[in-house]
Amino acid sequence: MISTTEPVTKKEKILKTAVEIFCKKGKKSTIAEIGAGAEVTDSIIYHYFKNKEDLLFHAAGEQLKEMTALVIDQLKDIHDPVDKIRKFAWYQLYFHDINPHYTNLTVFECRTNKSFFDHEAFQYFRDWTRILKDIVTDGICSGVFHPSVDIPIFRDAFFGLLDMESIHSLAAFETENVQNDVDDILYLLLPVLTNYFCPKANQLTKSERILFAAETIFAEKGYDSTTMIDISLMAKVAEGTIYEYFKNKDDLLFSTLQHRIRKNNIVLSDVTSNQNPFSRLRFFIQNHLFHFIDHPEFMKIFLFDGIFNRKFYKSKAAPDFIKYVETLYPILDEGKKDGSFKPDINNRVFKNIFLGLTSHMALRWHHKTGITEPIKFQEMKKAIQMLLRAVTNE
């Protein structure tokens, strides 16, 4: 929002005018029209923006930047996560009702353009969705929401539903005021978060809340920049309470890894023993990579603070990690025995190629932009095929 106490810069005036004109006319707007409205020449606009598309994306992002600041301010005094989600959903629908042209601009002009998702202004849309992620994370830590909630999937359901409300209002004229649907929306979405059918499962123990918060903060800020106060605030416990369960920050870090690895060991132990070695090996590799995709916070900690950290191998998590990767050994031995795997495979070397391939893939996924989930799944499929070819007689 442009300040009323400071002089308006030319760039700010161009953006404000661009929002107004793009919202009215969409892509049919011209640079000349925007220049006339902002009282600047075309050359001044091109000094700040590469072309009309660049200005369009920046204008859409600038408006959302203002919305984000407003809604964060409105949410700051609301403490119940359910009330926060209600307010957040209502605000987005309300904004649609009073600014339908802006919704039309972002939904039909920006999101249909592939370039928009690589543009710097798209960061404002990430910031907007981050509000929901923070609300849900806070709800899980406080025990209001179920710990098994898949935040990315819920985010897609939430924003996808609100988008469809807006689209069918704008294009199909189903309703004039989408904000009136907020109660019906929450009636569908809240059970997904709170799991009313199993209320006891909603409650995390204090130690589980601390571990959940620690994994989130360690992944977001890195080990060195994370403080115990950061974790206590997210877990909604006193800092001293953390020390009742964990000796220090190192102990907490490795406990988060141990917790996840033990869960994976339980999953693997549940695999039916009547499966053949080939199927069991494929499941093991697939489960490992799925875990990276489903739990990016864990993946980041596992890589940077786990297997590529010398201290990890002397930590409390090390025995569980060894048990986990050496689950491969009896699978390989059985396959060698029944002839489905090559007889001279060195189990230890195969373990290393498995860890090496999957960790390097995950590092690339983390560092390189533009690797979407469909691409990850394609790469995962090829990695599984490669590792299976390495051991089979075919």
Image (tube, grey):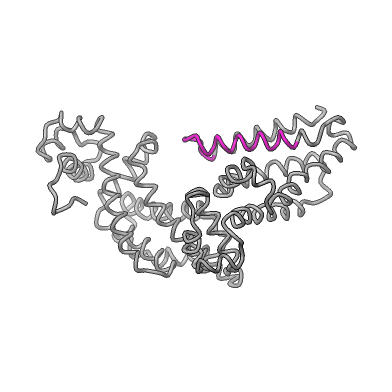
Please name whichever residue, 341 or 366, is drawn nearer the observer in this view of the structure: 366
Furthest-right residue in view? 337
In magenta segment, residue 367 = yes
In magenta segment, residue 54 = no
**Percent from the top left, x then y, of residue 50?**
26, 30
80 relative to 214 in the view: left or right: left
Please name whichever residue, 182 or 294, is drawn nearer the observer in this view of the structure: 294
For image coordinates 39% across by 65% down, the residue present is 84
Count of number-bearing discs: 0
Rendered position, 97 above or below 32? below
Q: Which residues are magenta?
A: 351-373
**Percent from the top left, x then y, of residue 104?**
29, 47
Q: Quadrant of the C terminus?
A: top right
**Percent from the top left, x then y, of residue 210?**
56, 62
Please name whichever residue, 160 or 368, is drawn nearer the observer in this view of the structure: 368
Please name whichever residue, 12 or 379, is drawn nearer the observer in this view of the structure: 12
The secondary structure making up most of the magenta span is helix
90 relative to 42 in the view: left or right: right
238 relative to 62 in the view: left or right: right
Furthest-bottom residue in view? 200
